[in-house]
Amino acid sequence: MHSATIDDCIQYGGATVVPLPAGRIGSVGKGGESVLLDDLGFLLARASAVGVAAGNDSLQPLGLTVRAFATLTLAVEHDGITQRGISDFLRLDPSRVVAIVDDLENRGLVSRLVGRGDRRMKAVVATPAGHALFRRAVAATRKGERDVFQGLTPEARTEAIRVLRRLAFPDEE
């Protein structure tokens, strides 16, 4: 693998552009350089896309997607979480959460109950079948994660999780 040195970098509109490794990323920009390789937002989105694709592949045999798995996980781990709580935590549009919960409920994996403090709120509770599928899904996603991120050492994985938690939940510090 080619590692770019400072001599390999190009100045482009005030930004340092790192050349793309030959054959690894394709022909992005002039001569294989891209500002995107130093763009944290892009790299996070790209890593997320890779992880979501792997997660969806791992979960497909169980009839789940990453979003459905995340919703089921919250129902398992936070008994009685509201649909609004799921929406807020996952940063999904509430209408999308309703559709996901509808699907999980139709499959007998979760139930909706009247909220404890507010009858207008719907609490989502995992059923025994939901708990069982959750356990299988965790195993499937962990295997998929290991396969996709196999280049990370255990220490690098732990550090990546620490940094990503800090970025994903900045108010939790």
Image (cartoon, grey):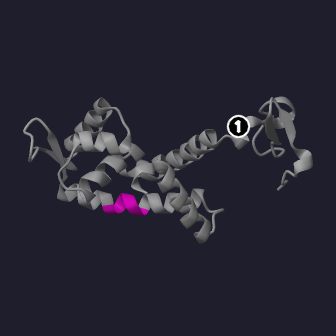
The amino acid type of the residue labelled 1 equals Leu
Q: Residue at x 54, y 45 (%)?
A: 48
Q: Is residue 1 above or below residue 25?
A: below
In the image, is residue 49 part of the stretch drawn in magenta? no
- What's the magenta region? 135-139
The C terminus lies in which quarter of the figure? bottom left
Q: Position of residue 96 (x, y in %)?
A: 32, 32
Q: Is residue 117 visible?
A: yes
- Label 1 crowd bin: few (<14), some (14–19), many (20+), radius 10 Å: some
Query: Magenta stretch mostly in which secondary structure?
Result: helix
- The residue to which callout 1 is attached is 36
Q: Position of residue 5 (x, y in %)?
A: 88, 52
Q: Nearer the viewer, residue 154 or 139?
A: 154
In the image, is residue 138 part of the stretch drawn in magenta? yes
Q: Residue at x 46, y 46 (%)?
A: 56
- SS class of the residue under badge 1? helix
Q: Residue at x 51, y 50 (%)?
A: 167
